[in-house]
Image: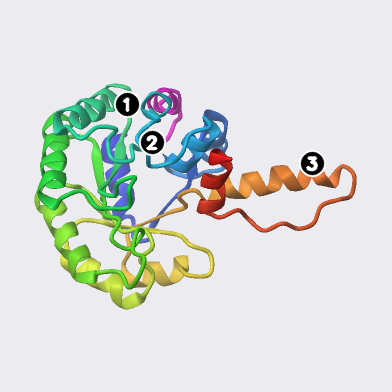
Amino acid sequence: MNSRFRDLHHAGRPLLLPNAWDFATGAALAKAGFPAVGTTSLGVAAAAGKPDAAGGTRAETLALARALARLPVPVTVDIEGGFSERPEDVAGLVAELADHGIAGVNLEDGRADGSLAPLGHQVAVVRAVKDAAPGVFLNARTDTFWLASAEPDRAETLRRVRAYADAGADGVFVPAVADDADVRAVLDAVDVPLNVLFMPGRTDYARLAALGVHRVSTGSLLFREALRAAVAAALDVTGEGDGAPVPSYGDVQDLISE
């Protein structure tokens, strides 16, 4: 599974990676023909009544990973920031996932308070993970664009993706990067595959493919679409459906805090 998953990043077109939040979703996506399945930390957390990116869903993430490992396709798991500040703990988690047959992980440098982990610390985590589970595809995510309240810092983005690639990351992920110039800059900065988040109205799969992006993931989009569809289906029973829009990431986080 691991070599198969790596090869999907070099197939001549971006790997379209849909993100599941439970076994049924993952199984349906695999049956639909997707060659690999990821998880969405927002979906996993919200389904458990917990906020995303707060480090509180280690048990739920492991339980889902064990279930998804039964699928006939490679699975990559979103482990947020690794559920620990200690590199050895994060490495141990990834090694456990590898033992269950998981092919990849997403590991982010964003923190719950909206800051970024110190670069040196995150590099140490990446190295520890690769030492403990060298066969797992480590997709090192930097939240320089995702957390930016103003203009994203491209220079800091490039500094971080280079550092993570040099530390052994197998791929880099810059969620919320969308402009052609920014995408090209990241592609030029590293020799490992680039993952871009699909954002309706902001990114286009064909355009990302033309730029040379290796992987396009759906993040929480499918989960949020499912929430909209569930509410609409319930309202339609009495003809009261109102065509509500897909809830945003923030809308889902707000649901948990209500």
Distance (Cα) linking label 2 and label 1: 8 Å
- Which secondary structure, mark 1? loop
Q: Amino acid at mark 2?
A: Val
Q: Which quadrant does the N terminus fall into?
A: top left
Q: Earlier in the sequence, mark 3 or mark 1?
A: 1
Q: Nearer the viewer, mark 2 or mark 3?
A: 3
The answer to whether residue 40 is visible is no
- Residue 182 image label: none
The answer to whether 230 is drawn above or below residue 246 in the figure is above
Q: Position of residue 250 (x, y in %)?
A: 51, 52
The answer to whether residue 250 is visible is yes
Q: Is residue 64 magenta?
A: yes
- Which secondary structure, mark 3? helix
Hey, which residue is sitting farthest right in the picture? 238
Q: Position of residue 84 (x, y in %)?
A: 24, 32
Q: Could you classify mark 3 by the number of other residues whose Cα lies within 10 Å: few (under 14), some (14-19), or many (20 or more)?
A: few
Q: Amino acid at mark 1?
A: Gly
Say whether residue 168 is left or right of residue 235: left
Rendering colour mode: rainbow
Identify residue for label 3. 234
Q: Position of residue 201 (x, y in %)?
A: 53, 69
Q: Nearer the viewer, residue 159 or 6?
A: 159
Q: Which quadrant does the C terminus fall into?
A: top right
The answer to whether 42 is drawn above or below residue 186 in the figure is above
Q: Is residue 216 magenta?
A: no
Hey, which residue is sitting farthest front in the picture? 258
Q: Earlier in the sequence, mark 2 or mark 1?
A: 2
- Residue 75 image label: 2
Tell me, yes or no, whether the two marked residues, 2 and 1, touch with CB atoms within 8 Å: yes
Identify residue for label 1. 101
